[in-house]
Image (tube, rainbow, N blue to C red):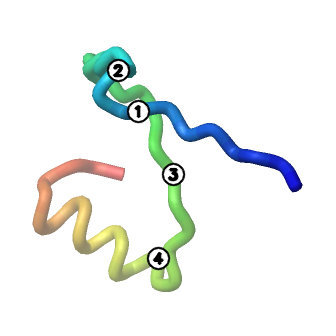
Amino acid sequence: MNAVLKPDLATLPAPAAIQQLHHYAYKARDAEETRHFYEDILGLPL
């Protein structure tokens, strides 16, 4: 039987804050719905 050691989260350093995001991608089922959301609602051109 193997033991799994889990670190105490209180002793871990805080993760670094995100300062920039260059690229993010995900699969979309409906390309037109996705375009509408980003361009027409958020105002971000694709």
Image depth: mark 1 or mark 3 in front: 1
Which x, y percent locates residue 31?
Answer: 46, 76
**Three-letter amino acid code at disc 3?**
Ala
Gap between marks 2 and 1 measured at Cα = 6 Å
What crowding class fits label 4: few (fewer than 14 Cα within 10 Å), some (14-19), or many (20 or more)?
few
Q: Going from the N terminus, do you reach mark 3 or mark 2 first?
A: 2
Direction front: furthest residue: 1
Q: Going from the N terminus, do you reach mark 1 or mark 3 first?
A: 1
Q: Helix, strand or loop at disc 1?
A: loop
On residue 39, the disc is: none
**Three-letter amino acid code at disc 4?**
Ala
Q: Helix, strand or loop at disc 4?
A: helix
Which residue in the protein does label 4 denote?
A: 31
Q: Helix, strand or loop at disc 3?
A: loop
Residue 35 lies in what quarter of the image? bottom left
Which residue in the protein does label 3 denote?
A: 25
Confirm or deny contact between disc 2 and disc 1 (CB under 8 A).
yes
Gap between marks 4 and 3 measured at Cα = 13 Å
**Three-letter amino acid code at disc 2?**
Thr
Q: Helix, strand or loop at disc 2?
A: helix
Which residue in the protein does label 2 denote?
A: 11
As drawn, 40 above or below 12: below
Which x, y percent locates residue 28?
Answer: 50, 74
Which residue in the protein does label 1 denote?
A: 8
As drawn, 13 above or below 24: above
Which residue is at the front of the view, 12 or 19? 12
Q: Going from the N terminus, do you reach mark 4 or mark 1 first?
A: 1
Q: Which residue is depicted at the point 29% across and 28% down?
A: 10
Q: Is 14 displayed left or right of 8 in the figure? A: left
Confirm or deny contact between disc 1 and disc 3 (CB under 8 A).
no
Which x, y percent locates residue 15?
Answer: 34, 22
